[in-house]
Image (spheres, coloured by chain):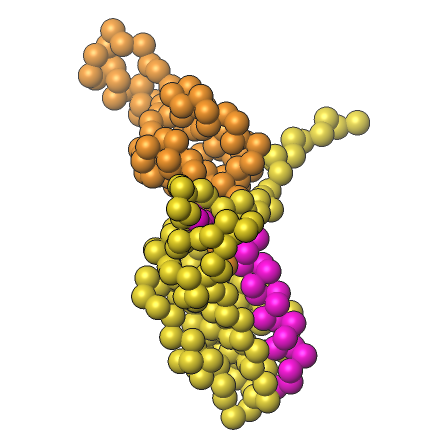
């Protein structure tokens, strides 16, 4: 079975995400299931009506981290293809900000991999969201990525 | 280092050799960019400097940065890195607030 990473898609885009095209991309004759995650802009945040969102990324690192997640998916789960796209810039209510599609021979791996992918993306990919309200804008509370601790010092020889 | 010394001596023999410096690229994102006022900077630092030592002059210039220090992670050349990571010439250092993609 082909599990080449070259069949995968990892992108940061500034245009609307074509979710149908990505969902179609991961489907192959040898697969039996595809699971997709569609994250889109909610009309409120903590009961405050949202006007729109603005996403920015550390683009080179974000793409690298998205590809790393893809590599982890292929290591951990029996899946076939991955498509993972995040949109940047201004997004209106209801527009897709992130879309992930995973295909696999069987549904279990596709579900597990898709869940792992979005959870890991939200924790480790350097992308930030600014929320715009009637009375101002705030950077959304986020998650602190796990980073290496201080370099261990050599212990004195005993 | 003989090479460095001879270069300095050739330029002006009265100048005492100083420690070498390196230049690094510094990036700020999210709320840090709002505080610092720009997203990209170029900084000349002593060659043994760590990421922590790159952050320090920005805190001196923008004291409110100090309150974000405990909720930041740093990266070196697009990989998460410990704050005591030593830097090399041409490295790209970024200071990253908690991420909120998705």
**Residue at the bottom extreme, as displayed:** A29
Residue A18 in view here: yes
- Residue A145 screen position, x and y as percent: 57, 47
- Residue A97 screen position, x and y as percent: 44, 63
**Taken as a whole, is the magenta stretch helix, strand or loop?**
helix
Position of residue B45 relative to residue A151, above or below, is above
A106 falls in the magenta region: yes
- Position of B15 compared to A58: left or right? left
Position of residue A153 relative to residue A116, above or below, is above
A62 falls in the magenta region: no
Position of residue A86 relative to residue B53, above or below, is below
Quadrant where the N terminus of chain B is found in the figure: top left
**Residue at the right extreme, as displayed:** A158
The residue sitting at 35% across, 15% down in the picture is B18
**Residue at the left extreme, as displayed:** B11
Residue B89 in view here: no
* Letter of the yellow chain: A
The residue sitting at 59% across, 89% down in the picture is A32
- Position of A150 compared to B78: left or right? right
- Residue A37 screen position, x and y as percent: 53, 71
- Residue B75 screen position, x and y as percent: 48, 42
- Residue B34 image-quadrant placement: top left
Seen from the viewer's position, the closer of residues A38 and A69 is A38
Q: What segment carries the magenta color?
A: A105-131
- Position of B15 compared to A23: left or right? left
The residue sitting at 38% across, 70% down in the picture is A17
Seen from the viewer's position, the closer of residues A37 and B5 is A37
| Chain B as rendered: colour | orange
């Amino acid at each position: 079975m082909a599990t080449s990473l070259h069949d995968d898609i990892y992108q940061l885009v500034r245009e609307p995400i074509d979710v149908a095209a990505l969902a179609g991309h991961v489907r192959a004759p040898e697969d039996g299931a595809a699971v997709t995650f569609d994250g889109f802009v909610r009309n409120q945040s903590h009961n405050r009506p949202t006007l729109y969102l603005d996403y920015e990324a550390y683009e080179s690192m974000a793409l690298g981290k998205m590809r790393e997640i893809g590599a982890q998916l292929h290591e951990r789960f029996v899946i076939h293809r991955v498509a993972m796209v995040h949109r940047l810039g201004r997004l209106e209510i209801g527009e897709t900000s992130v879309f992930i599609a995973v295909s696999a021979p069987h549904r279990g791996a596709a579900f597990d991999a898709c869940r792992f992918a979005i959870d890991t993306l939200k924790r480790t990919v350097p992308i930030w969201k600014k929320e715009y309200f009637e009375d101002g804008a705030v950077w959304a509370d986020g998650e602190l990525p796990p980073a290496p601790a201080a370099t261990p010092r050599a212990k004195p020889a005993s | 280092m003989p090479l460095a010394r001879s270069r300095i001596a050739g330029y002006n023999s009265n100048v005492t050799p100083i420690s070498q410096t390196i230049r690094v690229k510094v990036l700020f994102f999210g709320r840090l960019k709002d505080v610092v006022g720009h997203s990209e900077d170029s900084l000349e630092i002593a060659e043994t400097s760590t990421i922590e030592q790159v952050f320090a002059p920005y805190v001196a210039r923008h004291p409110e940065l100090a309150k974000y220090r405990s909720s930041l992670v740093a990266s070196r050349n697009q990989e998460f890195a410990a704050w005591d990571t030593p830097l090399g010439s041409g490295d790209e250092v970024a200071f990253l607030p908690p991420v909120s993609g998705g």
